[in-house]
Image (cartoon, helix red, strand yellow):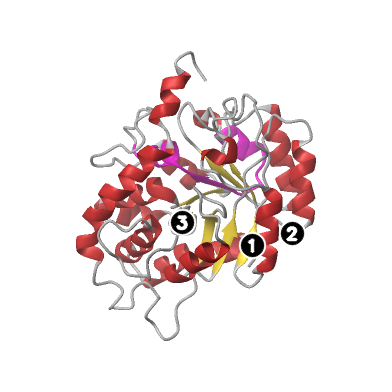
Amino acid sequence: MNKDGKSKLKKTSFLSRRNFITTSGLALAGTALSLKSAGILGIANEKPEPIIDVHQHSNYMGRYDKDYLTAHQRNMGVTTTILLPAGRSVISAATHKGFSNGLECLISGNEVTYRFAKEHPKEFLFGACEVPDLSGAVQEIEKYLKLGAVVIGELKFGVECDSPEMQKIYQLAQEYDVPVLMHWQYQMYNYGIERFHTMLEKFPKVNFIAHAQEWWGYIDKNYVPTTELYPKGKITPGGLADRLLSDYPNQYADFSATSGQHSLTRDEDHARKFLERHQDKLLFGSDCPDPANWDGEIIPGSPCQAIHTIAEIRKLSATKKIERKILYGNAKKLFKI
């Protein structure tokens, strides 16, 4: 983090994302209100089609009531959820001296996440995580891999993506044959995305799942890395993220959080072609902090951005086959569900 990192932390705070959710929710609502009555969300259908959510958290921005999380996932029509824990709360360079503890969103750690998943085995799976620059990080992650974790992540720390510490984690993923899920955010999390192809080449048996603002910015060939989280305007194909998905069999991406939703709504003409082009590499994730104070309806200002993401994927997929791959099939295959 550079000398003015403090101001950048303010700009990239979770509050900016929540403000974006509120305003974008109003814009989406006009086209989405009728989706439930048509059964398009999979909620009103007699036999809902299964959906796998590869990116969700338990204690997320104060959502401590376990019933809230299960209700939220069921209301979306999600049948299997993968819960991603945070690492330990520590003062270290990787956590920006504690600013990023709890993945910057009050998210619970390995043990809480593991126990929640074990209490709901038919609906929830779990991942394993730890702050990379801590002594014993690999051992902590391995402990939960041995208990059945299906992914390492969410890796959301202020480290170089090709640092020795991160490479130890990639090696562990290779040994246990699990994917690695990474949060890419300029000058905040996982530095050096322009060099990441070297890791894809060095660890060809490890499947890497990308998400967050910098990653989705890089679907645009004209993208210039910036602390502006949600760039606007038409997208020119051929950006770094687009190329990594095309060139490396082990690169995947999930449409979680506001950044994933924004990548679909920013330029729908581009999104349609992008979904078709990378139909075997894309996954649905929610990463949504909504406390389940809704009943599956898409309403103006709905706090759940993920319900809109599902609707957008269904709207923009050229075929039913592509839709089912993104919402279910790709994750089923990748996570061996």
- In 3D space, how far apart are the residues under numbered discs 1 and 3 (Cα atoms)? 14 Å
Quarter containing the C terminus: bottom right
Q: Is residue 168 above or below residue 300?
A: above
As measured in the structure, the alpha-carbon distance from the residue carrying label 2 to the one carrying label 1 is 8 Å
Instruction: Choose top left, top right, bottom left or bottom right for residue 18.
Output: top left
Q: Residue furthest top?
A: 3
Vertical arrangement, residue 136 with respect to residue 324, above or below: above
Helix, strand or loop status at disc 1: strand
- Secondary element under disc 3, as helix, strand or loop, is loop
Q: How crowded is the residue under tag 2: few (<14 C-alpha within 10 Å), some, or many (20+)?
A: some
**Mark 2, secondary structure of its residue:** loop
Q: Which mark is residue 125?
A: 1
Image coords of residue 69 (percent x, y)? 52, 62
Question: For the magenta stretch, what is the residue range?
Answer: 197-220
* Amino acid at dot 3: Ser
Give the residue number, with chain letter if any, for mark 3. 286
Q: Earlier in the sequence, mark 2 or mark 1?
A: 1
Of the residues under marks 1 and 3, which one precedes in the sequence?
Answer: 1
**Residue pointed to by mark 2:** 148
Residue 201 among those drawn in magenta: yes
Marks 2/3: CA–CA distance: 22 Å
Query: Left of 206 or right of it: where is 233?
Result: left
Please report contact status of discs 2 and 1: CB closer than 8 Å, yes or no: yes
Residue 179: where, in percent of width, then height?
Answer: 63, 51
- What amino acid is at disc 2? Gly
Q: Position of residue 315 (x, y in %)?
A: 30, 65
Amino acid found under the numbered disc labelled 1: Leu
In the image, 291 versus 227, the foreground residue is: 291
Q: Is residue 333 above or below residue 2?
A: below
